[in-house]
Image (spheres, helix red, strand yellow):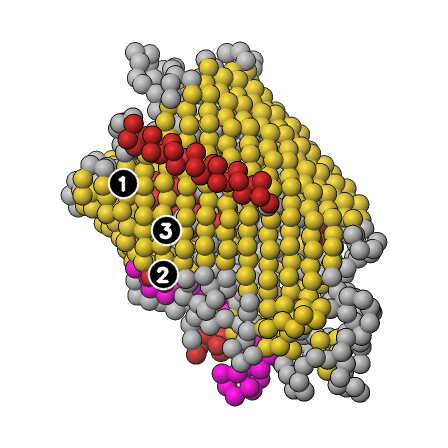
Amino acid sequence: MGKGLWFKRRLLMASISTGLVSGLFAHPAAAAQDEETNVQNLPPVEVTAPASATRRTTPSRPVARVGTPGSASPRTRIYVYPTAPGTGRGLDVDKVPSAINAVDASQIKRTGSLNVTDALRDNIAGVNISEVTGNPFQPDVEFRGFVASPVTGTPQGLAVYQNGVRINEAFSDAVNWDLIPTAAIRSVTLVTNNPAFGLNALGGAINLQMKDGFTYQGAELDVMGGSFGRIQGSAQWGKQVDKNYAVYGALEGLHDNGFRNFSRSDVRRFYGDVGYKAGDSEFHANMGVAKNDFGASATVPAELLEKYWGATYTTPQITSNRVGYLNLIGKVDATPTWTLEGTAHVRRYEQKIVDGNPTDAQECGVDPTLLCFGDDTTPANGVNGVQLANPFAPGTILGEIDRGTIRSTSFGVSGQATNTDQLFGHDNRFVMGATYDAGVTRYNATAEIGSIAENYVVSGSGVFLGPTGLPDPVAGPVSLRTINQYNGLYAMDTFNVTDAFAITGGGRFNVARITLEDQLGTALNGDHTFTRFNPVIGGTYKITPELTAYAGYSEANRVPTPLELGCSDPARPCLIAAFLVSDPPLKQVVSKTVEAGLRGTKELNIGTLGWKIGGFRATNHEDILAVPAVGRTGFGYFSNVGRTRRQGLEAEVNIKSPALQFQASYAFVDARFLDPLELGSESPFADPATETIRVLPGNQIPAVPRHRVKVGVDYSVTDVWKVGGNALFVSNQYLVGDESNQYAKLPSYTVFNLHTSYQVAKNVQLYGRIDNVFDKRYATYGQFFDREAVPNFTNGGAEFTDPRSLSPARPRAFYAGMRVTF
């Protein structure tokens, strides 16, 4: 991102390092402590208003007192849940007409991982993780059959917010989990049944709230190492300088060689916050930078995995992510009943991908000294439009190195107002807000012809493909500029009909405009506008002080991304995330969701019991699917496929006490197509004439396991020694490409993990963990691939016989670390 950003990153790192030294040695303080959490692991808010004798109520103007000295004023703790993208205090959980899903900082820390996705997988019933890229730091997060993925070209169904700022990337709505500073996370909530979170919240919104110097004070150093060359470390420091100012910083670094060939990972992240409080006003400036590099970004033919679990296929596969962002956040209690808040943000994101693939380039039949494309007669042209000479020896197996770069600058502002005046003599909470987000992206792609060796490494030749003409005008370079403009206006009201019964209603109006500007011609030019109003209505009823029922209905939409709009013609498929063509427009996806359930808490002798059970049904209209082009590895197109439905059940029980933490959950997710359609597929059951499969109403959607069971326990053997473990069961699932449900499913798997910690001294803790204790060999994702594209060199160059290509999970791994707090 240039020398300027490099200098700023170094300056920020130097600043936090100086702060850490200052905090550790110049200003002795109590050791940093985790916040105590309770209701569904939400951070508490202390308010200067007494609680009702029978229930928690939101005072007219709660004033947060987390981390501040005590006073004589009467206090109570309430637990609130976000109902809008703003960073305000949210709504009392008793009044939220949807499921409550939250993860706190201590649960993230317990995983010993710098991946926040690991904590989501372990602690939220409906979440499933698939390592589609083959790298643990870039997983797909699937919740209720909807996905937030870092893979460019994956239809996204979850919105992700960090401190009130939407971080789905502008070009493809992808979510790069590796860019999120995990140590700096205060809490994560997964919000459902709420259109206020704008575009992409079809299945819900993942809302990350970050730490600051008012909520986190002290310092912590954490280092860990272990299997596969893993070395990682993090440092965080927070300090309330005086009554008005506070600072916070977190620095993280990781190196991992990976268990697969060419799967090295390097993660470097920084996050910082400067806060100011004066009376009822609070302002923050937070910023972050990251520079991450990854390998092994693809599935592997099952036959290669049978020979070696760490195999890769057609490398290089390299992904490099860079980001820098600045957010300004302000909140003012304008009157005793009006709270105003606003945000402004700017984000610069760059991604570079180098991907070795099979190619459709080949020797020409009549003249083998020339190259053809797609068949042995259609000329393969260079970037100058002249047919390419064949620089390779006869019989060489040809490949292709596809390179793509995405450079996005996004910015936006938002404003939100909350009012707690009574209405008709009843408690009422009204929220309204407006958002504006814009993003400008430059996308470029090239394809270099190369040769494939017996280790499946593609070596470049310096020969680049240009446009090849009909029927395959997709091999040449692409240079595209896109502009996203997203506007939103939302309002939500929660009215207490009685002390026990509350109703919520509201909605959001979205306007999206996406402009495509071809930098090499006019074929990709386009201007698309989408509008949609999404309503929400729901209610909660407190049956007893310890039992609440909820129900709600909502709608949400997502608009096609610039990538999807540039690749939607089945007759002219694209190398997804590389080569685009001029295509017809797509329709926006609209999801209609209903959910209902029960939740409760109860104090027991062994601790606080929390439980919940709920059901949901979400129907997508004009759903978008990535459809592969048969016989062309990596090529495909995006298409509206009619209606799909995701429905299911989620249940959880947990016990929390100083000595014991126990959690068990079960989730059932049934995801199906509701309309018939015909899709291209590499399935062995595809029609040999059309190379398609017929999908019937009721067929299950691939890559969505129906059953997920999770059990976790932590127990304090003594005051200084803790032991724990967790188990995860994920049922079988259909392979991507088997939408007709004719092939055998990807097998289910059960994984056990153990961890322990020992408090050597007040401020020093040693810990260790064993992942995949029984060394289970399993795959989290599977798809079909073109078996004829490249020979099976492990079998004498014969053709592959197994049509499956899989993402292997990490074998057993041992890790140990030390955590020091100040």
Q: Is residue 773 above or below residue 184?
A: below
Amino acid on which the number 2 mark rests in the picture: Gly
Region of the chain picked out in magenta, as a range: 790-814
Mark 3 → mark 1, Cα distance in angstroms: 14 Å
Say if residue 543 shows up in the picture: no
**What percent of the width, then of the height, locates residue 821?**
28, 37
Measured as percent of width and height from the top left, residue 418 is found at: 55, 21
Residue hosting label 2: 229
What residue is pinned by disc 3?
232
Mark 3: which secondary structure? strand
**For residue 105: magenta?**
no
Query: Residue 295, image x and y in percent?
Result: 50, 62
Return the residue nearer the eye: 685 or 247.
Answer: 247
Amino acid, disc 1 = Val
Query: What secondary structure prevails in the magenta region?
Result: loop
The verdict on residue 793 being magenta is yes
Q: Secondary structure at mark 2?
A: helix
Q: Mark 1 = which residue?
A: 820
Residue 292 is at least partly visible in this image: yes
Q: Is residue 56 left or right of residue 565?
A: left
Residue 705 % position (x, y): 49, 59
Find the distance from the CA under tag 2 to the CA under tag 1: 22 Å
